[in-house]
Amino acid sequence: MSNPVQLVPNNSLITKTPEEGRQLAVKMARLIIKITQPDEKVRESLRPDYANDASMLISIGQVVATEFATIAAANNYWR
Amino acid sequence: MSNPVQLVPNNSLITKTPEEGRQLAVKMARLIIKITQPDEKVRESLRPDYANDASMLISIGQVVATEFATIAAANNYWR
Amino acid sequence: MSNPVQLVPNNSLITKTPEEGRQLAVKMARLIIKITQPDEKVRESLRPDYANDASMLISIGQVVATEFATIAAANNYWR
Amino acid sequence: MSNPVQLVPNNSLITKTPEEGRQLAVKMARLIIKITQPDEKVRESLRPDYANDASMLISIGQVVATEFATIAAANNYWR
Amino acid sequence: MSNPVQLVPNNSLITKTPEEGRQLAVKMARLIIKITQPDEKVRESLRPDYANDASMLISIGQVVATEFATIAAANNYWR
Amino acid sequence: MSNPVQLVPNNSLITKTPEEGRQLAVKMARLIIKITQPDEKVRESLRPDYANDASMLISIGQVVATEFATIAAANNYWR
């Protein structure tokens, strides 16, 4: 039981639409936080820290933008 | 009603012009903040925090630059 | 009058030279700050904050580097 | 015995699946921390620092996203 | 006399070697700081701030890495 | 004696293996710090600052990830 969390939902970067690709980016970013801090209670207790802090909200946007760049390239930008 | 916010306006990265692509980058960056902090009142209360802070304004620029890189590539840089 | 600020000067990423591309990167970075903090007086008041702070000067360099990467690719690196 | 730590497991960026690629990204990120701070006791003592800090959890997500971008490109995005 | 500082030395990203490309990355990063803080005395006064601060030294490394990525791609990685 | 430090070991981004590429990424990142703070004693004095600080260890990982992305692309990902 080394790593019970699936880090890439559906084990694929391919999505039907940009919208789904964006949702995948958000999920993948969250899953890294989940494996780094596996305790759900702690994660929940941290939520007000970042959800009410402009600087951290911006940083979350940076991570999602980076994940999305990879997913968009994988999908040839859904052209 | 899992995720009522559309993360990619028009569900497409393709835009007619660089200007529209840039506006899309700004919107996509803001939408990630919106789903992370869904309470509009809280988001509004955070506005003076980042709009009057040089460091956060720069960080917002970083996120937009990263989103725009993806959108520009998707559009073959509007060459 | 939704967004009176033009975010991409000349609505193009194509420039004649790397030097002009670099100047465009600087301008595009500044324009994002302009639309996020539209009040010119506030922006001017923030200038000493970042111009005298090594950490923020470095962060500005990071944003410009990221914008320039996109512009350089758009111009096939002016080879 | 200059560098006993292997920085790239299996000395390859190629993986069978996106899931394995994501796990490799996490491992490669951790291995850089390992060679920078080789003392396991110190690393363990730092764990509560980052695992209970929203800002650092986000930063870890940023590093993994960057490593994963390279691994995904190496694997042609497992298309 | 709008912008007397040349932002891209020799107005080209093409260099003979990786070493010269790396030096160009360092110069281009520094030139952005120069136009943002044009006062040489202030820049000199900031030097001990970043040269003795581990965190800022790392951030400088991040900017140079980003600039170098663009220059290396422009030169087809000097293959 | 303008710049006695060689910034790119062997003046090449090409390596035989991913492992060697990763080691090159670490070295190149360190060499930027070396030219920014040339005093070895100061650099040594900063070591405990970053080696015992989770946030800085993560930032170092970010720089290495960025350098490695360039080196991996230069080597066609050692496919």
Image: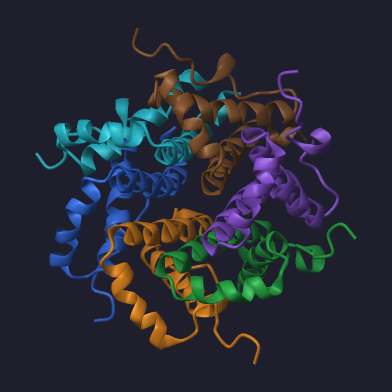
Chain colours: A green, B orange, C blue, D purple, E cyan, F brown
Quarter placement of the C terminus of chain E: top right
Residue at 25% over, 36% down: E46
Quarter placement of the N terminus of chain E: top left
- Residue C45 image-quadrant placement: bottom left
> Percent position (x, y) of residue F5?
45, 15
Of all residues shown, which one is farthest toward the top? F1
- Residue D2 image-quadrant placement: top right
Q: Nearer the viewer, residue D2 or E14?
A: D2
> Percent position (x, y) of residue B39?
46, 86
As drawn, is C1 to the left or to the right of E1? Answer: right
As drawn, is A21 to the left or to the right of F49? Answer: right
As drawn, is A9 to the left or to the right of E30? Answer: right
Residue at 22% over, 70% down: C38
> Percent position (x, y) of residue D39?
68, 35
Q: Nearer the viewer, residue A68 or E45?
A: E45
Of all residues shown, which one is farthest toward the bottom? B1
Residue A26 appears in the rendering: yes
Judge whether A54 appears above or below F4 on screen.
below
